[in-house]
Amino acid sequence: MSRFAGAFVNQWFGKAPLLLALVFACALPAAAAATEPLRIENLQVEGGEANWHASNGFRLDWTQVPGPPLLPRAVLYRLFDSEGHLVEGPVRDTEFGRMIDVLEVPPVPGIYTVEVWLEDDQGNVGPASRAALRFDDTVPPPPAPQGPDGWLAGHETAVLKIGHPAGTLPLAGIRGYAISLDRGDGGSPCAHPAWCSVAETDLPQGIADDTVALGTLPEGETYARIVAVSGSGVTSPVTSVIFRSDATLPRLSLQGAPAGWSSGPVRLAALATDELSGMAPAGPTGPFTAIAVDGAPPALAGGDSVSTWVSGSGTHRVAYFARDAAGNVADGSPGGPLPETAEIRIDEDPPWVLFAAAQDPAEPERIEATVADPLSGPSPDRGSIRVREVGSHGRFEDLPTRVLGDRLVAHWESDDYPRGKYEFLATGYDRAGNAATSGDRAKGAKMVLVNPLKTSTDLEVGFGGRQLVWHRCHRTRRGRRCHRQAIDRFDLRPGERAIPFGHGVQFGGLLQNISGAVLGGQEVAVTETFASGSQPARRTTVVRTRADGTFSLQLAPGPSRNVSAAFAGTRTLTRAGGRSVHLDVQASIRLRASAGTAKVGGAPIVFSGSVGQAGAAPLEEGLPVELQFRYPGADWSGFRTVETDAHGRFRYAYRFSDDDSRGVRFQFRAYAKGREGWPYEPAYSRPIAVTGA
């Protein structure tokens, strides 16, 4: 028959009590007389009779008395609803004699009662056993979990509070709540999306078991997924709540802190950033930033920045910290992290500056001053020494100054300054940048020096060696007369001299101090400045004076030049420069003729020659050369001007055509005129003779 044929069951059960009573009345005495009827002891519902089931199918088993080898021929049962109304039965099952594998109650939540008895082979039935079948598959309403309003600090325990489900609760009630945590990609906290086991129910003590400590959570967002679990294990829809945790202290930077010493008050600003909970102002309990100076109460401002002033000479300890929206803070509280610190060093007083008490005789041009500062100390790289003539009222001139520890050291090139008195100022700095200027010596006198500081020197120069033998010549009626003269003093020797091309000449001098004492072993630089168009343009040769203070140098052949000498001075001797003398060097020119006899009206005579170029820059254009002639009793006359090529060579063909030239012996010569940029003096070639025929 149909398992839930309600109409049939009601009709049958309306007449069944009397009929069953008669059947049992007739059957039981006979069965009792034959054997003991089979009875059920310890009737059990799988999953527990006291527990609610989410499925309407139940499995029952029991203990049979007496037991095997006696076996029932059939199992009979009846099902009643929670009000005692018969829902089904009796049902006679002959397939399973030891259990009821699946007994389905109507799909309506409720507490059902089942009666089960056994029938033996003789048709005898034993007493009925009863069990409750609790079925409820109702989905409970979702809970209302509550998370914290803001961020949690990394050390804080996250507490989840669960608001009770609103609405009609299942018949089975609320067993508790199941919870899972994820990073945003989770789902139901139970393995089955619609049902939770007892083991999966994290808060199993009923609807009031609604608070749980989740411990400390990882940084960032953590999602708590919560379901309410009914007494039968049916889960509500999943609800979620977000926990935000920030375990990292705000990042701090301190602006305005000088790298070294400061010369005045310092304004500091602490800036804080936090990528998670942030530093947005939120009142007295929200984020703040703070700076404390020398242990005093901190300057504090809501949000991500605060500033304060640090003043007064000395070393100041500054602590700065911040609290983010989660409450992370390193303020040095007991057991907590320490704040960040910095040292601010302030020196508001200038240093002391004094010149050395006296000059060093071995280095009179060394100007030295001492800088002292008891707090920050002298600057290692700043300072200056200046000089001006006393009474000039002009600006002081800076001298090249070095900083050597606590001293300023300058070198005064006194040779560059005229004679007179000079005053000095020294400006020193400390490490904080404070400056002080002084013109006093260590013993109180003013820093004034009289120039020259060093022993003065004198340098005489001229042509020749230790002695110049000079011939002064002049013409008289009787011919050319010369007077030999020996000159020892260099400054009395002629300041100009002429020599032929390719010749050298000796140049020398004497170095002595202003008292006339000779200065031996000193270096003198002899400089030859060649005439325009020379190569090289200048040549300097360093020679050393002999024990008697003299020096000499053989000047090499070359173009015309000015020659000078200079003594650079020493730490105790002044510079000295000799006069400049001039050396004229005549050009070198040669002339040749193709024949010594020229036939009048015949083939021309070819004149050729060259101009020496040693020491001259390469020619870009030819040099003018004038060809001259004379005959007996006549002066020299020019008859043609030609130009050399780039190598200084020239050539000219001349034809004798005058009959008066027969038998006349002519002399010819070439005259190198030179031009601008030519470094030699004008010169004539040796004459050559050509006779007309």
Image (tube, helix red, strand yellow):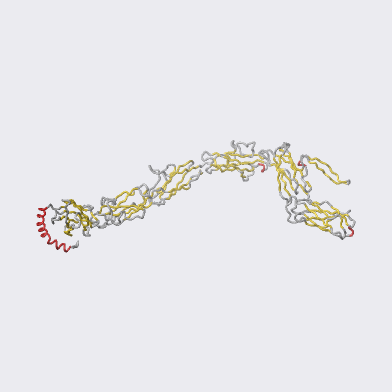
29 horizontally vs 164: left or right? left
Locate the N terminus by quadrant.
bottom left
Where 194 falls versus 391 (above or below)? below
Q: Position of residue 185 (x, y in %)?
A: 36, 55
Q: Position of residue 241 (x, y in %)?
A: 33, 54
Camera-side residue of 407 and 157: 157
Where 657 falls versus 387 (above or below)? below
Q: Position of residue 245 (x, y in %)?
A: 37, 50
Camera-side residue of 297 and 259: 259
Q: Position of residue 413 (x, y in %)?
A: 65, 42
105 horizontally vs 28: left or right? right
Locate the C terminus by quadrant.
bottom right
447 horizontally vs 605: left or right? left
Which quarter of the picture shows residue 136?
bottom left
Which quarter of the picture shows residue 623?
bottom right
Residue 299 is at least partly visible in this image: no
